Image (cartoon, rainbow, N blue to C red):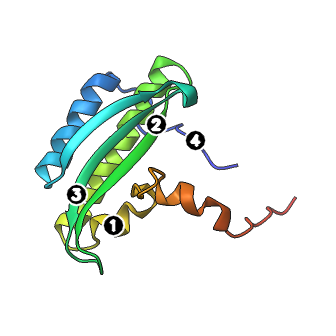
């Protein structure tokens, strides 16, 4: 089984509120807009949403991205999870800035569709059968 949250930011002293401010800063710094967070009580998660322009794809325009982050676990586990989200978004924005990728490419699974679902949620049933690990 893959490791989950065992190393990165496990000792962070920054809480979720400060991390969300840092995510907002990074998204804005790299040209994103309309950053917001909403709680999703039925799924016990925080949903982080922002928009970013992508001119490198077949349909140029502003794309909305949505990241659902679980609020399960201890306060320290939740803080570390949000630090991981910050690292993912910041690293992805740097790659976009250097022309390595585009917003729609790097955040593809998180694009919000016209139905309100993310691309991943919409395509989840189309995923191939996962490999079975050798016993």
**Residue on which the image places disc 3:** 52
Q: Residue furthest bottom?
A: 58
Q: Quadrant of the C terminus?
A: bottom right
Q: Is residue 104 left or right of residue 132?
A: left
Q: Earlier in the sequence, mark 1 or mark 2?
A: 2
Mark 3 or 4: the one toward you: 3
Q: Quadrant of residue 108 in the image?
A: bottom left
State how far apart marks 2 and 4 are (Cα).
Answer: 14 Å
Label 3: which secondary element = strand
Residue 90, above or below 56: above
Which disc number belongs to residue 69?
2
Q: Earlier in the sequence, mark 2 or mark 3?
A: 3
Q: Residues within 10 Å of mark 1 (few under 14, many from 20)?
A: many
Labelled pair 1, 3 in contact (Cβ < 8 Å): no
**Residue on which the image places disc 1:** 104
Labelled pair 2, 3 in contact (Cβ < 8 Å): no
Residue 14 visible in the shown view: no
Q: Earlier in the sequence, mark 3 or mark 4?
A: 4
Name the spot of residue 82 as percent of width and height, x first: 39, 34
């Amino acid at each position: 089984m893959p490791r989950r949250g065992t190393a990165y930011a496990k000792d962070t002293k920054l809480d979720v509120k400060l991390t969300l401010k840092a995510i907002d800063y990074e998204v804005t710094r790299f040209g994103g807009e309309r950053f917001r967070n909403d709680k999703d009580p039925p799924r016990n998660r925080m949903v982080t949403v922002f928009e970013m322009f992508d001119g490198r794809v077949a349909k140029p325009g502003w794309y909305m991205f949505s990241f659902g982050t679980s609020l399960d676990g201890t306060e320290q586990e939740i803080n570390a999870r949000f630090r991981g989200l910050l690292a993912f978004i910041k690293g992805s924005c740097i790659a976009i800035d250097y022309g390595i990728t585009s917003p729609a490419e790097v955040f593809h699974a998180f694009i919000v569709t016209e139905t309100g679902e993310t691309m991943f949620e919409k395509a989840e049933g189309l995923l191939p059968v996962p490999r079975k690990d050798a016993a």
